[in-house]
Image (cartoon, helix red, strand yellow):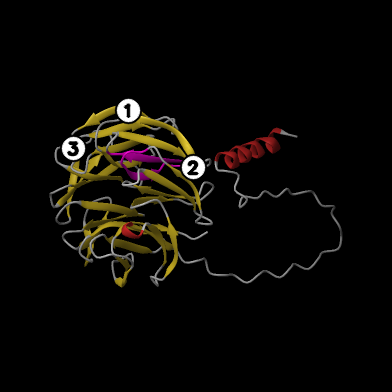
Amino acid sequence: MSTRTWWPALMLSALLAACGGSGSHETTTRTARPITARVRAAAPRPPRTAPPAPQALVTAETENRLLVVDLPSGHVAKRIAVARDPEDIAANSGACSSVVAVSAAAGKVTVLDRETLNPRRVIGGFKSPHIPEIAPGGQYAYVTDDARGTVTVIALGTPRVSGAIEIGAGAHHLSFDPERQLAWVALGESARTIVILSTADQAHPRVIGRFDPGFAAHDVSFAPGGRRAWITSANGSDVTVVGAIDHRPLFRVPVGRGPQHVAFAGRYAYLTSGYGATIEKADAATGRILARARSPYGSFELAAGDGYVVVSSLLRGTLAIYTPGLKLIRVVRLAPATREVAVSPPA
């Protein structure tokens, strides 16, 4: 076997092993055909089918379920039982497609297969797990634990815990800087310290720095490209955008009463003020507000992608569905309390 042949095969085998050997990944081997004078008629092409519509994944905290909601209809396609009091979730697609649901009260993390939505494993041993984020490449999920002050790394292919690191009490929101192979973690929901982790070895991150953002920070999100981080306020009305290297403020975006949250879609940033009952669309490069709309009171969490923007209201139990321009499509009531939401293409 030549180098050109065995090297891709080796890489594919390693990827399948890392991601559980999903049967959805197939390889085909092309063999040379003899040249003949007769030309066969081309086989008719199958009719094109529209891609499946995206879905919103929503945690119904008091019902101990993960809801799968079709977009834009708002129809609940599936209700999945998970560990008690699910709060935050993360989802990805690709070779290691997974959904990670964190249940703080139960001290457990549920890892589901995105293709089947069947739970693959429930991982215990946490004290107060809170925020899950899937690292660039999709092979690992990081989970913060407020009470233990740790970040735990879960290998999604197994799934199993590959390591944990102590970073300080109140470990909460985190975001990845893929350009510099870093992650920022806010210590607390009103954080005066942000910890910087090196993720060059994603399975075993390490602390390389800390800084004070200069205000009580709540959430942190890196804009596409990784040059800027958007840091939301725990109690102020502005979101502060800082340089990824020097951490100096570049500009501020007025949003409304804190805490706020941020999601990105292409070159746009979407921001929520749950207590202000507003959602905004801003230019990610300048912070200029491009659109603003009302949202159900208590709509803290949001997600954007696949042609939709969605916000879930913890206090109203609703999911509001918008176009990318923030034209409201519909509001559907799903449960007594809907906390976190993610947009994910169906398998």
Q: Is residue 272 above or below residue 332?
A: above
Q: Residues within 10 Å of mark 3 (few under 14, many from 20)?
A: some
**Amino acid carrying mark 1 in the image:** Val
Q: Between residues 26 and 240, which one lies in front from this camera angle?
A: 26
Residue 125, quarter of picture: top left
Tell which tag, 2 or 1, sits nearer the viewer: 2
- Disc with the residue nearer the chain's start (1 vs 3): 1
Q: Residues within 10 Å of mark 1 (few under 14, many from 20)?
A: some
Q: Is residue 330 above or below residue 134?
A: below
* Residue under pointer 1: 207
Tell which tag, 2 or 3, sits nearer the viewer: 2
Q: Between residues 242 and 330, which one lies in front from this camera angle?
A: 330
Q: What range is drawn magenta here?
A: 126-146
Q: Is residue 198 above or below residue 266?
A: above
Position of the N terminus by quadrant = top right
Residue 43, quarter of picture: bottom right
Q: From mark 1 to mark 3, how far is it between C-alphas?
A: 17 Å
Which numbered tag is attached to residue 213?
3
Q: Left or right? Give the position of 136 relative to 7.
A: left
* Residue under pointer 2: 156
**Amino acid carrying mark 2 in the image:** Leu
Q: Which secondary structure lies at badge 2?
A: loop
Mark 1 near mark 3, Cβ–Cβ under 8 Å? no
**Amino acid carrying mark 3 in the image:** Pro
Q: Residues within 10 Å of mark 2 (few under 14, many from 20)?
A: many
Q: From mark 2 to mark 3, how far is it between C-alphas?
A: 32 Å
Where residue 289 appears, x then y in whole percent? 21, 59
